[in-house]
Image (spheres, rainbow, N blue to C red):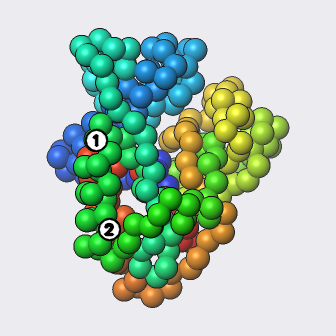
Amino acid sequence: MARHSHWHNIQLKKGKADARRANTFAKLAKNITVAAREGGGDPAFNFKLRVAVDAAKTISVPKDNIDRAIARGLGEGGEVALEEVVYEGFGPGGVAFLVACVTDNRNRTVADVKMVASKNGGTIGVAGSVMWMFEKKGVLTFLDPATIPDRDAIELALIEAGADDFLPVGTDGVQATCDIKDLKRLAEAAEQGNWKPDGTGIEYVAKTTVAVEDPTVRAELEKLVEALEQNDDVDAVYTNDL
């Protein structure tokens, strides 16, 4: 899985069935709604909204869908009761995972997440049981090496903008991490260099990782993560496996 990454998942979903695509559209719309509710409807002045809208555009979410999601966040058409919540647990091979959700019904979501985890070799723990193994970071993700022909140049530019590490993601991709406060600077540096990231956002990054060498256990772990991601309320799943 190579450090399970939210943006890697979004890229993979481009080639999935229409039903999965619609599910992804709905999840990204929730993120846009939450961002608009928190910081207003103009991406130029609301960086969280800009990130959410850019993520939606990455998989060609229609403009009308984006506009409706922003309108809901601004209170048009009734009050929106969405909230962000993170559940913590352990999966096959002792791998720790976080399940980031956006939901309008916390009781429903926790029941669903626990059920999916238990059916797929995982357990959901109490708050704090896993979170200490991760840190919340700003990230810029490049999945296609062809988008960064001069790796040294982009790394230098991003370091000057505040990047504190570069991590592998997917098969050949790289993810630059930074303090959340520096994420906007990294995004601007990439834009100035004409480097187009596949994703810009805030993710939970494992402080240390564990290796899952048994192919059977790895298959079980992949199955657990995929099952969790299929839930409508689950925005992303993060693990601490290599």
* Residue tagged 2: 117
Visible in this render: residue 130?
yes
Label 2 Cα crowd, 10 Å radius (few <14 / some 14-19 / many 20+): some
Q: Quadrant of residue 26?
A: top left
* Residue tagged 1: 105
Visible in this render: residue 24?
no
**Closer to the camera, 98 or 170?**
98
Residue at position x 38%, y 14% in the image: 74
Check the image and report above or below for 52 versus 11: above
Residue at position x 78%, y 39% in the image: 162
Q: Secondary structure at mark 1?
A: loop
**Closer to the camera, 39 or 24?**
39
Q: How many marks?
A: 2
Residue at position x 44%, y 21% in the image: 36
Q: Quadrant of residue 158?
A: top right
Check the image and report above or below for 64 versus 28: above
Check the image and report above or below for 62 versus 59: above
Of the residues under marks 2 and 1, which one precedes in the sequence?
1
Residue 130 lies, in percent from the top left, at 55, 65
Q: Secondary structure at mark 2?
A: helix
Residue 234 lies, in percent from the top left, at 34, 49
Residue at position x 58%, y 76% in the image: 210
Check the image and report above or below for 204 versus 84: below
Q: Amino acid at mark 1?
A: Asn
**Closer to the camera, 204 or 215?**
204
**Closer to the camera, 73 or 129?**
129
